[in-house]
Image (cartoon, grey):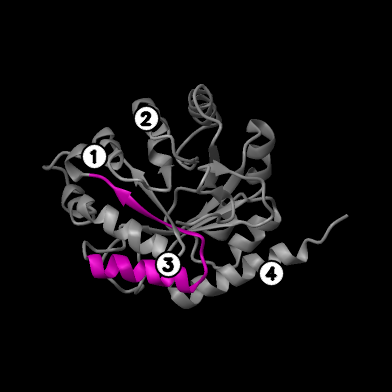
């Protein structure tokens, strides 16, 4: 059992005020439907000294009609839900928190069977009130991405969650894959924190491993970054994801940034 890692206290399942940034390796769908690759992503995250790893859980049929063009791609990215307890056990053994982003209510129902460490609501789902309500019922630390949303969307989601939970955070996100550096708008991190009074981090889809350190310097308490075992692998997210060496440099940069803060 992991007793404590950064912003989470697993024994209390509670966000904590802590000087260290919670670094989440976003495995997403880069497992390519191969459990060996999925475990390899966990190994990469652990070796780089991340704090957590996260996968995505969905069924193509619930997101898009089979006759539509994108169905075949999504179907090829599905995570086998039977892997969840296996991957969680493996991640926890490597001292990583294990999180999942569900994209539909049926996926949340599946997660109820497994004691995952945290839940992430993707930016594309921030308007899905039913999904948010079901995720809150899991009584796990909850992270929300803001990318595909307006300030009103964010406010409505936060107001809904606050009715039953105080254990959640928000990630500033630019929903472009990958965005240009001048599109990142990192000053939103501080703006969101001041507006909503909750922990705010940054989910970075850029190809840079330096930008997350800048986000931390600007107040991000959580960093989420896509990772891959091979940038040339088949799949939509591998190209803009960090490989093991880049991820290690990113983590080192964030920790050096934290160490440089000092006090006043």
**How far is mark 2 from mark 1, CA to CA?**
12 Å
Q: Measure the C-alpha gap from mark 4 to mark 3.
A: 23 Å
Residue 66, image quadrant? top left
Q: Which residue is mark 2?
A: 128
Label 3 or label 1, whichever lies nearer to me, is 3
Label 2 vs 3, first from the N-terminus: 3
Depth order, front residue of 12/244:
12
Residue 245 position, x and y percent, is 48, 78
Left or right: 203 in relation to 40? right
For mark 4, what is the residue?
A: 256
**Residue that carries the numbered disc 3 in the rendered image:** 94
Q: Which residues are magenta?
A: 35-58
Q: Disc 2 and disc 3: Cα gap in Å?
A: 33 Å
**Label 2: element kind:** loop
Please state, as top left, top right, bottom left or bottom right, where the C terminus lies in the image: bottom right
Q: From mark 4 to mark 1, how far is it between C-alphas?
A: 41 Å
């Amino acid at each position: 059992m992991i007793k404590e890692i950064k912003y989470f206290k697993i024994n209390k399942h509670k966000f904590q005020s802590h000087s260290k940034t919670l670094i989440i390796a976003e495995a997403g769908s880069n497992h390519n439907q191969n459990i060996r690759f999925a475990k390899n992503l966990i190994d990469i995250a652990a070796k780089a000294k991340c704090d957590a790893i996260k996968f995505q859980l969905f069924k193509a049929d619930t997101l898009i009609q089979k006759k539509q063009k994108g169905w075949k791609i999504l179907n090829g990215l599905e995570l086998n839900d039977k892997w969840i307890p296996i991957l969680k056990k493996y991640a926890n053994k490597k001292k990583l928190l294990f999180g999942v982003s569900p994209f539909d209510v049926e996926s949340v129902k599946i997660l109820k069977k497994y004691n995952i460490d945290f839940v992430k609501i993707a930016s594309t789902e921030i308007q899905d009130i039913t999904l948010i309500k079901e995720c809150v019922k899991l009584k796990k630390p909850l992270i929300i991405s803001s990318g595909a949303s307006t300030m009103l969307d964010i406010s409505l989601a936060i107001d809904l969650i606050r009715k039953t939970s105080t254990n959640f955070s928000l990630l500033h996100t630019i929903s472009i894959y990958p965005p240009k550096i001048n599109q990142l708008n990192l000053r939103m991190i501080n703006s969101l924190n001041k507006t909503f009074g909750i922990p705010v981090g940054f989910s970075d889809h850029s190809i840079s491993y330096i930008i997350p350190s800048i986000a931390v310097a600007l107040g991000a308490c959580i960093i989420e970054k896509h990772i891959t075992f091979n940038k040339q692998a088949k799949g939509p997210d591998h190209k803009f994801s960090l490989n093991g060496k880049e991820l290690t440099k990113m983590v080192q940069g964030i920790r050096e940034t934290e160490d440089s803060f000092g006090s006043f």
